[in-house]
Structure formats: C-alpha cells, structure tokens
Amino acid sequence: TVENGPSTVDGVLQALEFVCQSGPFLNRQSCIALLEERGLDSMTAAWLCSSLRKSVTGAGGVEFTYDIDTVRRLYDAYGRTDLWAGADTLAQTGKLGIIVASRNMKAWRGSDEKLLQLGPSVVTTLEAGHNVHVDNLPGMLQVMDPTLSRYR
C-alpha cells in the first residue's frame, strides 16, 4: 500500500510528474521552488534537481531528461509485484535475511509485518534511514559479511 503524501515515494513521484510537464526551467533554483510548492522539502527537491540537464529542446534552461512516464510504469509495476511465495520459500530454508533501517521503522507495519512473522533473520541497523546503503554502509556490510564470506 502506498501512502499518498509529499514524503512518500508516490508523493515525490507525483510532484516530479507535475514538474516534468512544466519544464524546461530557467535554472535549477526555479525547479527546486516548484517542487517545494508541490510539498517537497528543500533537501528532497535539491536532490531531485541534481539530475537536471541543459535543455535539449533548444528553449534554453534546464530540464529532466529521463522519461517520467517510464519511471511511473516501473514504480507501479514494482507495487504490483507479489514476492510472498519466494519469501515463504526462503524463510523455510533459513535463507531469508532482512535488514531493517532503525530510522525507517514506520515502514514495517500492516502487510509487511507478515514478512517478519515468516521467521527470517532480522537485523536492525543503527543510524540508518530508508537508504541503508547510503546512511550506514559499513554497518550494512558488517551485517552481511557472514553471508558474503561464503561466496569468497
């Protein structure tokens, strides 16, 4: 289930879809301002605008060069993908491990709780948000080391 708000993936994508239809932009700051008007915080807006490129339309300014419709289709397909059968099988073989970001615990509710009930090895990382690989790469690698060492 996708929550609908500016701090959710779907909310960010909705803001980005709107903004992509509004470009090209005079400059990066004008795009950031429009994303903020759509409800995004300044850090998220600035991060999104790091992918702006010089406009290829000849109109000058900057624009997003990726295909936002494809991004939407990929995200929607991801949301429709059911991986429960695979998770059930892996849990039964003891091969399912989950790394939970300590600053993203609110994401583990509702149907996601079923995953935790399958009996996987669960590790909660310290000082990490949604992007564990960015927030705490050393911690993530430490947790994964026993598994990865089997493949060395």
Image (cartoon, helix red, strand yellow):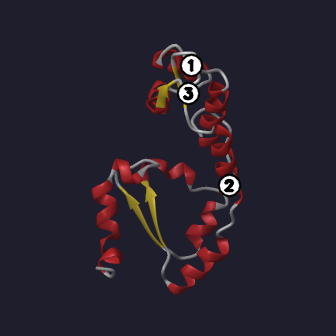
**Callout 3, which amino acid?**
Leu
The answer to whether residue 95 is above or below residue 140 is below
Q: Which of the two labelled residues, at mark 2 and mark 3, occupies the earlier sequence position?
A: 3
Q: Position of residue 22 (x, y in %)?
A: 65, 21
Residue positioned most to the bottom: 93
Q: CA distance from mark 2 to mark 3?
A: 22 Å
Q: Quadrant of residue 70?
A: top right
Q: CA distance from mark 3 to mark 1?
A: 29 Å
Q: Position of residue 151 (x, y in %)?
A: 33, 80
Q: Residue at x 55, y 17 (%)?
A: 25
Q: Which of the two labelled residues, at mark 3 and mark 1, occupies the earlier sequence position?
A: 3
Q: Residue at x 54, y 26 (%)?
A: 56
Residue receiving disc 1:
58
Residue receiving disc 2:
79
Residue 98 falls left or right of residue 86: left
Residue receiving disc 3:
40
**Callout 1, which amino acid?**
Gly
Q: Residues within 10 Å of mark 3 (few under 14, many from 20)?
A: many
Q: Position of residue 113 (x, y in %)?
A: 61, 63
Question: In the picture, which quadrant includes the C terminus?
Answer: bottom left
Please tell me whether mark 1 sits on a helix, a strand or a loop: loop
**Callout 2, which amino acid?**
Gly
Q: Residues within 10 Å of mark 1 (few under 14, many from 20)?
A: few
| Cβ–Cβ under 8 Å for marks 2 and 3 | no
Q: Residue at x 33, y 67 (%)?
A: 143
Q: Position of residue 44 (x, y in %)?
A: 48, 31
